[in-house]
């Protein structure tokens, strides 16, 4: 007789309900720090300090994009915990870091006009699998942080995918650009953003810059060229410090 198959192991729940449950458990059950593993809550004071004191700067590949911190150490682990493991309470401090990158990218123009933070859209399949849209959540948190500083800022998902794209992980820069070219478009909202707001692209991470470049192309094609772009982190060496804002997108 054939061997009796072993009972299947229970699989972790997926989707919005799972993330809502994870968020509730995070509040009720003491958690270890997502940045370093210390038994001091989801974000320990040391990792919070690391995130809060990182100095934003422009990226080498896209000087008009500023990142709050390098994609390494606690910052990398915090972003992954928020994005892939539903650590939703990290959206606040990560959004504050993104807000600092927005201010850095705009430089002296910060506060001269109302802002609309436009997140680079996640693929619909990725949003379904994660149960939330991490970049849209960070954009909202960054807009709230900027409003607390007295700036007129809102976030809105202006962009959407026109077609499916391959997973970017592991693709070199040239293939990433080919994969994404023409993949994004602006949602039909009329000729200008609500209230005449100036768009600023935001994302959680910049690697080769292909996603931000395609998002900027799509906005510009709709007559809404972004005034700058900002991310929480930049991968590898694609980030440099500067005393002022980098060159702006044309």
Image (cartoon, helix red, strand yellow):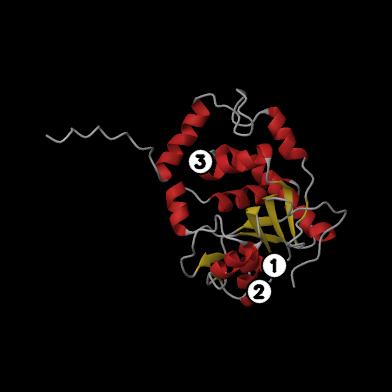
Q: Are marks 1 and 2 in contact (CB under 8 Å)?
A: yes
Question: Which corner quadrant holds the C terminus?
Answer: bottom right
Q: Is residue 250 left or right of residue 209?
A: right
At x 52% / y 57%, what residue is drawn? 122
The circle drawn on residue 226 is 1
Q: Secondary structure at mark 2?
A: helix
Question: Which quadrant holds residue 219?
Answer: bottom right
Label 3, label 1: how far apart the Cα atoms are: 29 Å
Callout count: 3
| Residue 179 x/y as whole percent | 54, 67
Label 3, label 2: how far apart the Cα atoms are: 33 Å
Question: Which quadrant holds residue 32?
Answer: top right
The circle drawn on residue 86 is 3
Q: Are marks 3 and 2 in contact (CB under 8 Å)?
A: no
| Residue 239 x/y as whole percent | 76, 53
Q: Secondary structure at mark 1?
A: loop
In front of the other: 196 or 86: 86
Q: Secondary structure at mark 3?
A: loop
At x 55% / y 49%, what residue is drawn? 134
Question: Which corner quadrant holds the N terminus?
Answer: top left
**Does any portion of residue 207 appear in the rendered image?**
yes
Crowd band around label 2 with a 10 angstrom C-alpha radius: few (<14), some (14–19), many (20+): some
Q: Is residue 131 left or right of residue 181?
A: left
Q: Residue furthest left?
A: 1
Label 1, label 2: how far apart the Cα atoms are: 7 Å
Q: Which residue is mark 2?
A: 220
Dot in front, 3 or 1: 3
Crowd band around label 1 with a 10 angstrom C-alpha radius: few (<14), some (14–19), many (20+): many
Q: Return the disc, 3 or 2, that comes first in the chain's sequence.
A: 3
Q: Return the disc, 3 or 1, that comes first in the chain's sequence.
A: 3
């Amino acid at each position: 007789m054939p061997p009796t198959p072993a009972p299947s192991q229970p699989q972790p729940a997926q989707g919005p309900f799972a993330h809502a449950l994870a968020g509730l458990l995070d509040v009720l059950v003491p958690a270890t720090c997502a940045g370093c593993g210390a038994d001091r809550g989801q974000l320990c004071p040391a990792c919070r300090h690391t995130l809060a004191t990182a100095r934003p700067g422009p990226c080498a590949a896209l000087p008009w994009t500023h990142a709050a911190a390098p994609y390494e150490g606690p910052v990398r682990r915090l972003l992954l915990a928020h994005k892939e493991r539903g650590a939703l309470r990290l959206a606040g401090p990560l959004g504050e870091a993104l807000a600092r990158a927005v201010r850095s990218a705009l430089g002296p123009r910060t506060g001269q006009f109302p802002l609309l933070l436009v997140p680079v859209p996640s693929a619909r399949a990725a949003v379904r699998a994660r149960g939330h849209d991490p970049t849209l959540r960070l954009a909202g948190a960054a807009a709230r942080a900027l409003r607390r500083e007295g700036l007129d800022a809102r976030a809105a998902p202006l962009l959407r995918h026109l077609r499916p794209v391959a997973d970017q992980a592991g693709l070199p820069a040239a293939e990433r650009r080919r994969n994404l070219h023409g993949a994004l478009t602006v949602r039909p909202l009329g000729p200008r953003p609500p209230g005449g707001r100036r768009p600023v692209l935001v994302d959680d991470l910049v690697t080769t810059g292909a996603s931000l470049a395609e998002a900027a192309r799509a906005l510009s094609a709709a007559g809404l060229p972004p005034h700058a772009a900002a991310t929480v982190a930049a991968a590898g060496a694609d980030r440099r410090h500067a005393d002022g804002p980098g060159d702006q997108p044309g």
